[in-house]
Amino acid sequence: MANKSKPAPKPFSTNEILYSALWIVTIAVLCALAVVWFFYTHFGGQNLSTDPASWGQFGDYVGGLINPVVGLATVILVFLTLLVQRHELQASLAELKRSNESATNQNFEQSLFAWLASYHGLVAAIRDVTGASGREAMQLWYSTQFSSRAVLAHSTEGTDAAAAYASLIHSIFIQDLPDMTGSNVVTDSLREELDDLYAEALIAYDDVYRHQIVNLDAALRTLYRLIRWIDRAEITDRQKWHYVALVRSQLSWIEMVYMFYNGATVVGEKFVDLADRYALFDNLEPGSDFIVRYAMHKVRTGIRTGQKMAYNASAFDSSRAKELRGLEQDA
């Protein structure tokens, strides 16, 4: 049988201590009155003595009986006073700790939002030669160079790219991948084709990054540093999860796609661990991008053959990431 530890005793409250002190004083007073009453009942009715020696004997009688009681009561009251002071000191320290924690959290959140605003400013400053800016420019580079449609068009150059795209979409979304979280139902030939397209998409993204490094490096590096700063902060794991989830909620779909491909390249490989630990792609819906869809399917179903994927399943699933970190699941 498992040993059941006894619960810690509940400390006395200040009011309980004060009531105890009141009872002790009351008992001491009643003892003094009882001594006088006992003397009166046995020796009452006599004339008051005018002899100082008799009064001295009376004082010795009263003092001899009451002084031990008063002395003991005094010791107990001093002890209770120390308890009250200890409780007040603990309350003051607890309040000071709460104030410090509140101030620390406030400073942390101010730094977080300032850092997040800096990141959004860097994204907004992105410019393309066509005049597109911010997320619009990111969407333009994605759609024309490393989206699934663009990659497929490049790989099927000289053939009917539109027909090839329609055929592959039909295979992925209707026949072979009806459920992204389901069993491994991708045929070997289709998997090989998708592995090749995924590898080409990584090359295409890397090419975009190299050509647009002036636009992209600061934003992606800032986002990485921000999440790593949260991960290394001296706060609880639940707070870390909360703040990273807050950052994640600020990211658009196109930003998450860039993060997804960036972590799969040498330049952004340090991002992979953070993505796995905090489910950074939990909100990444593949949409019509069948390459992203296939990559997510391959990771979630644990397929190990063919093109190696950078991320683990926890990068796309908050429940799994929380379980690995020992965090409670949301109700």
Image: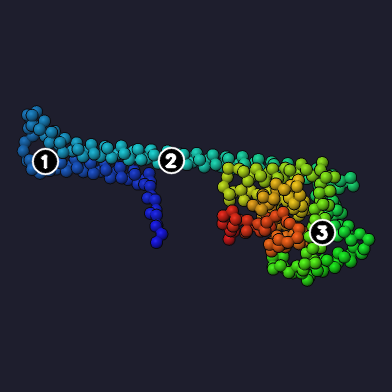
State how far apart marks 3 and 2 are (Cα).
64 Å
User: In the image shown, does 247 or 84 lie closer to the viewer?
Assistant: 247
Q: Earlier in the sequence, mark 3 or mark 1?
A: 1
User: In the image shown, does 66 or 132 lie closer to the viewer?
Assistant: 132
The crowd level at tag 3 (other Cα within 10 Å; few <14, some 14-19, many 20+) is many
The crowd level at tag 2 (other Cα within 10 Å; few <14, some 14-19, many 20+) is few
Give the residue furthest to the front: 305
Residue at horizontal 63 percent and vertical 46 percent from the top: 231
Give the residue furthest to the top: 52
State how far apart marks 3 and 1 are (Cα).
109 Å
Residue at horizontal 62 percent and vertical 43 percent from the top: 232
| Helix, strand or loop under label 3 | helix
* Residue 135 appearing in the image: yes
| Residue 121 horizontal/vertical position (percent) | 76, 42
Q: Earlier in the sequence, mark 2 or mark 1?
A: 1
| Residue 158 horizontal/vertical position (percent) | 94, 61
Q: Which mark is residue 197?
A: 3
The N terminus, quarter of image: bottom left
From the image, tell me which residue sits under label 2: 90
Query: In front: mark 2 or mark 1?
Result: 2
The relative height of residue 297 versus residue 80 in the rendered view (above or below) is: below
Give the residue furthest to the left: 46
State how far apart marks 2 and 1 are (Cα).
47 Å
The relative height of residue 283 versus residue 76 in the rendered view (above or below) is: below
